[in-house]
């Protein structure tokens, strides 16, 4: 019978932990990137009435500004630190105690952000897919389905809409940034606002 020394076990555990930490990298975020991608938003409405034709719903939810902030602004040539945004992802987090959320989705985007320059407007973006209104959790708010969220018992569903943008510097470093829009969804509640 062969005995294993305690130091051998510790060394094996340390090697396993090191291998695991190397394999758990995020493909979208590179901490060695020379720029930070910072998103800020200006929200115009915080309530969305799901009633077709509800008043005030033809307004944009808000605007998003993106800025590529240089981590080391003393470098003389920053041209290769400009960021090309190529996609964005929208996901959801309930803030009312419920757990059902619409499916997240990813859409293409093409935007060049100058490193160290002024913030740029993201442009038009979608906060949920059209078919999401007929799916959980929104479908429960429709009168034919009871008009209440089954998880909370409320006539509203509140959640953060999380917008994440992804891209890379001209030199090839991955960058990403995110912002949130807190929204309340309801049906026949006086319009959007």
Image: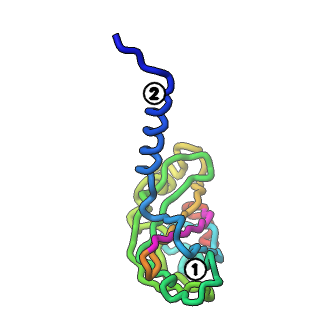
Q: Which residue is mark 2?
A: 8
Decide: few, some or many residues near mark 1? Use Cα within 10 Å; few <14, some 14-19, many ≥20.
many
Decide: few, some or many residues near mark 2? Use Cα within 10 Å; few <14, some 14-19, many ≥20.
few
Above or below 72: residue 164: above
The picture places residue 149, in percent across and down from the top left corner, at 54, 48
The picture places residue 1, in percent across and down from the top left corner, at 34, 10
Q: Which residue is mark 1?
A: 68
Residue visible at 51% across and 82% down in the picture: 81
The picture places residue 24, in percent across and down from the top left corner, at 44, 50
Residue visible at 52% across and 71% down in the picture: 33
**Magenta-drawn segment:** 173-183
From this viewpoint, is residue 183 visible? yes
Mark seen at residue 86: none
Looking at the image, is mark 1 or mark 2 earlier in the sequence? 2
Query: Which element carries disc 2, helix, strand or loop?
Result: helix
Residue visible at 62% across and 50% down in the picture: 96
Viewer-proximal residue among 22 and 47: 22
Asked if the stretch drawn in magenta spans residue 22, the answer is: no
Viewer-proximal residue among 55 and 82: 82
């Amino acid at each position: 019978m062969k005995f294993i020394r305690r130091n051998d076990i510790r060394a094996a555990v340390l090697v396993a932990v090191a291998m695991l930490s190397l394999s758990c990298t995020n493909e979208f975020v590179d901490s060695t990137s020379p720029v930070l991608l910072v998103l800020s938003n200006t929200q115009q409405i915080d309530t969305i009435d799901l009633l077709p034709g509800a008043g005030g719903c033809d307004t944009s939810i808000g605007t998003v500004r993106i800025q590529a902030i240089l981590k080391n602004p003393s470098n003389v040539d920053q041209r290769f630190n400009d960021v090309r945004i190529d996609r964005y992802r929208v996901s959801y987090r309930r803030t009312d105690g419920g757990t059902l959320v619409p499916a997240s989705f990813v859409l293409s985007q093409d935007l060049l952000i100058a490193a160290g320059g002024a913030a740029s407007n993201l442009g038009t973006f979608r906060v949920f897919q059209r078919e999401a209104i007929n799916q959980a959790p929104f479908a429960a708010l429709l009168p034919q389905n009871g008009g209440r969220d089954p998880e909370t018992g409320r006539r509203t569903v509140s959640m953060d809409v999380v917008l994440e943008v992804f891209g890379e510097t001209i030199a090839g470093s991955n960058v990403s940034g995110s912002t949130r829009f807190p929204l309340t969804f309801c049906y026949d509640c006086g319009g959007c606002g």
